[in-house]
Image (cartoon, grey):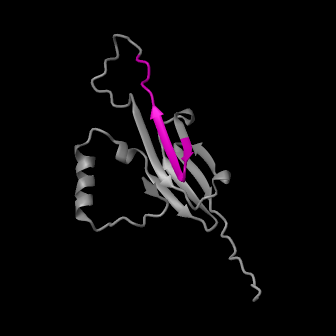
């Protein structure tokens, strides 16, 4: 689970660096590299761009659960056409899935917009408006 801003993570923790390297190097899954996400702060809103190349728009789901935005994508197995001339030696593109959560507690969830174009999912996340501090004078009895 990730927040919009990367606070709370210790980038100098070497054990985490080696652990991530180990997962990337020895894993059969390309999931770590398959969907990178950039988040920009535009003042009144965040712009989130996620790479989901190879997925169709219908394969992607965006859900809001409590104060989290959950992006998930799943590519199903393609039906394999049988013929004698094509024989797979290795098939790596038959199935893939992706799921990631982001904390959106400071986002106005009623005005979130999403667009998917050329393998990039762009989500506009408007920030909640800051409430003016209430000021009033009390009468002394």
The number of discs equals 0
- Any part of residue 66 in sight: yes
Viewport quadrant of the C terminus: bottom right
Residue 79 among magenta residues: yes
Q: Nearer the viewer, residue 84 or 123?
A: 123
99 relative to 49, above or below: above
42 relative to 80, above or below: below
Q: Nearer the viewer, residue 140 or 72?
A: 140
At 26% from the left edge and 48% from the top edge, which residue is drawn?
Answer: 23
At 39% from the left edge and 66% from the top edge, which residue is drawn?
Answer: 8
Q: Residue furthest bottom?
A: 140
At 34% from the left edge and 10% from the top edge, which residue is drawn?
Answer: 84
Q: Position of residue 133 (x, y in %)?
A: 68, 77
Magenta stretch: give its range. 62-80
Q: Nearer the viewer, residue 134 or 126?
A: 134
Left or right position of 2 against 136: left
Quadrant housing residue 57:
top right
The secondary structure that most of the magenta stretch takes on is strand
Q: Position of residue 130 (x, y in %)?
A: 66, 70
Q: Position of residue 13 (x, y in %)?
A: 26, 65
65 relative to 105, above or below: above
Q: Position of residue 36 (x, y in %)?
A: 43, 51
Residue 51 among magenta residues: no
């Amino acid at each position: 689970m990730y927040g919009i801003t990367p606070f709370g993570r210790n980038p100098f923790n070497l054990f985490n660096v080696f652990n991530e390297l180990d997962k990337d190097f020895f894993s059969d899954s390309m999931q770590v590299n398959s969907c990178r996400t950039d988040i920009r702060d535009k003042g009144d809103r965040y712009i989130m761009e996620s790479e989901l190349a190879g997925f169709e728009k219908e394969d992607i789901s965006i859900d809001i659960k409590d104060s989290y935005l959950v992006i998930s994508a799943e590519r199903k197995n393609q039906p394999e056409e049988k013929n004698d001339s094509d024989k797979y030696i290795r098939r790596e593109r038959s199935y893939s899935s992706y799921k990631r959560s982001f904390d959106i507690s400071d986002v106005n969830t009623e005005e979130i917009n999403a667009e998917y174009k050329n393998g990039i999912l762009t989500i506009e996340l408007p920030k909640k408006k800051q409430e003016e501090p209430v000021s009033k004078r009390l009468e002394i009895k």
